[in-house]
């Protein structure tokens, strides 16, 4: 028993020693892992803090520089005549090279190095060509100047290039000078053309530079790149015919034809309601800029124009809304639909042109739209009043017909309408306008002017002494002799004009 107790005691002591070692090892491992994780977390936190601090400092510097630059431009705007650096007519600025090694130029050749020897060689070339390198202008005192001088120096530079050895530093310098002079010549010719005409003519657009407006009630966007035109920063051009606006840098990339030219060549509407043909007919390309459009890319998703039925890219279709002439003439529908930018410009130019002959396009419209029928009757009456006013000296002196100056076609006929006329009929504006003008004309003819009043008629059937006119209500005009009669009296007389009866009786007596 004693041996067993001793053995059991030794085994217990040994187990306690092992357990103590295991616990100490696990505690050491846990302590090491904890310290490692803490070091990693501390390092990551320090790194993130440094990155955030650096990013904040960098953004702050950028915002400060941009704000300072804009403030300087606003406080001291460029003088008139100074051109924007973003203008496509200007060549890219030549980089100032500080190292002695040649640098690749986008044109496909190497610019010469700027070591002292090459600088002396370049100065000699400038002296030989007769140009000032700093301002790249002709030296003073020269007989030739302007475009002719540049053309002369370009020819001289070509001759010098042909005399040089291939791949030599002098030849590279001369090629670089030749390109500079050609760009300068092109710029000078464009400036001369602009100075002579004052406008750029591109795709039918007559684009002239617009003055920068510092305060605008709304943002203006470039019709080519769809970016904002900042009046203080950017030089912009505007078409005097259709209102097309673009940056100076976008002039050479204009693809849209001037809507003013289209409206002048073919002043007519598409009178089919949304004549859609589908993307396949357009080869899945934008109808204007020919960029591929697809529903899989939100940046190039096709947008349908309700006027033309064609599909456009987001750059050429800004979800502008217009009233469709086809829907008005066929359905009397004045809801606005989405149209492309070029369709919007065309519809805006055509909106006041009287080219809609409603009696031919949809004669049933006059039966269902009471306001339209009323306007038609008033226009017919005013055309009759026009005959009185044209022969009245007082009306000519007072320029009575000037009241219809905004709608000159109302004086010419009673059946042609513009889209704006139909819109105003729908809103009630045109009816109020015509009632006002109608009262002015009627008051002059029937009350104010004795000459016009003396040209009235008296009904020969009832003979009550009331002076009536062809534009009065309840009056009928004989188609044979133009005599005015009361409609009731004419009906009671079996639709026989007494004047026509007398004339026929007289003719029989003479026979």
Image (cartoon, rainbow, N blue to C red):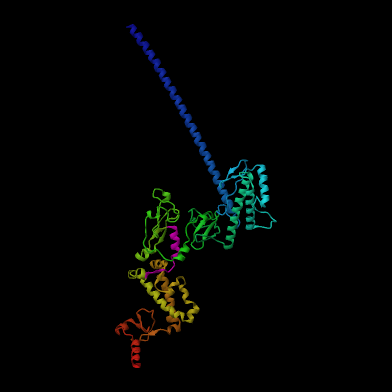
Residue 343 on the magenta segment:
yes
Name the side, left or right, on which 264 lies relative to 192: left
- Tell me the quarter of the image containing the N terminus: top left
Q: Residue furthest right?
A: 141
Where's residue 241, x and y in %? 50, 63
Closer to the camera in the image, 288 or 471: 288
Closer to the camera in the image, 124 or 245: 124
Residue 342 on the magenta segment:
yes
- Tell me the quarter of the image containing the C terminus: bottom left
Where's residue 102, x and y in %? 60, 42
Q: Residue furthest top?
A: 2
Asked whether the viewer can see residue 1, the reply is yes
Where's residue 292, x and y in %? 42, 51
Residue 119 sits in which quadrant?
Answer: top right
Where's residue 317, x and y in %? 43, 55
Residue 4 sits in which quadrant?
Answer: top left
Start and end of the magenta stretch?
A: 340-358
User: Exactly how many numbered labels are in the figure?
Assistant: 0
Residue 190 sits in which quadrant?
Answer: bottom right
In the rendered view, tell whether residue 372 sits above or below residue 482: above
In the rendered view, tell whether residue 177 sits above or below residue 425: above
Kindly identify the residue that appears in the image at 37 percent across and 13 percent down.
Answer: 12
In the rendered view, tell whether residue 16 sits above or below residue 72: above
Closer to the camera in the image, 153 or 470: 153
Asked whether the viewer can see residue 369, the reply is no
């Amino acid at each position: 028993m004693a041996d067993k107790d001793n053995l059991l005691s030794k085994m217990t002591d040994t187990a306690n020693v092992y357990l103590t070692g295991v616990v100490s090892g696990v505690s050491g491992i846990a302590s090491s892992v904890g310290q490692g994780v803490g070091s990693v977390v501390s390092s990551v936190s320090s790194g993130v803090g440094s990155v955030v601090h650096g990013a904040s400092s960098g953004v702050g510097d950028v915002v400060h520089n941009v704000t300072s630059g804009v403030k300087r431009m606003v406080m001291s705007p460029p003088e008139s005549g100074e051109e924007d650096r973003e203008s496509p007519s200007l060549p890219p600025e030549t980089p100032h090279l500080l190292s002695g090694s040649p640098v690749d130029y986008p044109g496909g050749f190497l610019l010469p190095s700027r070591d002292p020897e090459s600088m002396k060689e370049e100065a000699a070339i400038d002296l030989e060509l007769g140009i000032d390198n700093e301002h790249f202008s002709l030296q003073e005192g020269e007989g030739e100047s302007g475009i002719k001088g540049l053309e002369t120096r370009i020819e001289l530079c070509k001759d010098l290039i042909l005399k040089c050895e291939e791949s030599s530093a002098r030849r590279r310098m001369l090629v670089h000078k030749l390109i500079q002079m050609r760009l300068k010549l092109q710029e000078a010719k464009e400036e001369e053309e602009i100075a002579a005409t004052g406008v750029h003519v591109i795709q039918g657009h007559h684009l002239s530079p617009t003055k920068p407006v510092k305060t605008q009630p709304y943002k203006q966007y470039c019709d080519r790149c769809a970016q904002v035109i900042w009046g203080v920063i950017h030089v912009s051009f505007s078409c005097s015919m259709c209102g097309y606006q673009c940056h100076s840098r976008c002039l050479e990339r204009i693809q849209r034809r001037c809507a003013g030219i289209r409206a002048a060549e073919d002043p007519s509407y598409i009178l089919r309601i949304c004549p859609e043909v589908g993307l396949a007919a357009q080869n899945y390309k934008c109808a204007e800029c020919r960029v591929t459009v697809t529903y899989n890319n939100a940046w190039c998703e096709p947008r349908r124009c309700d006027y033309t039925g064609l599909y456009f890219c987001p750059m050429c279709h800004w979800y502008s809304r217009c009233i469709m002439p086809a829907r008005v003439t066929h359905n009397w529908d004045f809801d606005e639909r989405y149209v492309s930018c070029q369709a919007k410009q065309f519809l805006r130019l055509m909106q006041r042109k009287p080219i809609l002959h409603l009696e031919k396009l949809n004669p049933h419209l006059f039966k269902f739209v009471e306001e339209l029928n009323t306007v038609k009757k008033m226009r017919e009456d005013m055309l009759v009043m026009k005959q009185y006013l044209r022969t009245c000296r007082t009306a000519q002196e007072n320029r009575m017909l000037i009241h219809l100056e905004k709608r000159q076609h109302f004086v010419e006929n009673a059946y042609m309408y513009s889209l704006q006329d139909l819109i105003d009929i729908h809103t009630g504006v045109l009816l109020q306008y015509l009632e006002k003008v109608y009262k002015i004309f009627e008051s002059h003819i029937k009350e104010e002017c004795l000459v016009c009043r003396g040209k009235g008629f008296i009904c020969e059937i009832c003979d009550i002494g009331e002076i009536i006119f062809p534009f009065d209500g309840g009056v009928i005009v004989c188609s044979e002799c133009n005599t005015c009669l009361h409609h009731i009296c004419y009906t009671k007389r079996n639709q026989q004009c007494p004047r026509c009866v007398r004339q026929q009786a007289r003719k029989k007596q003479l026979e």
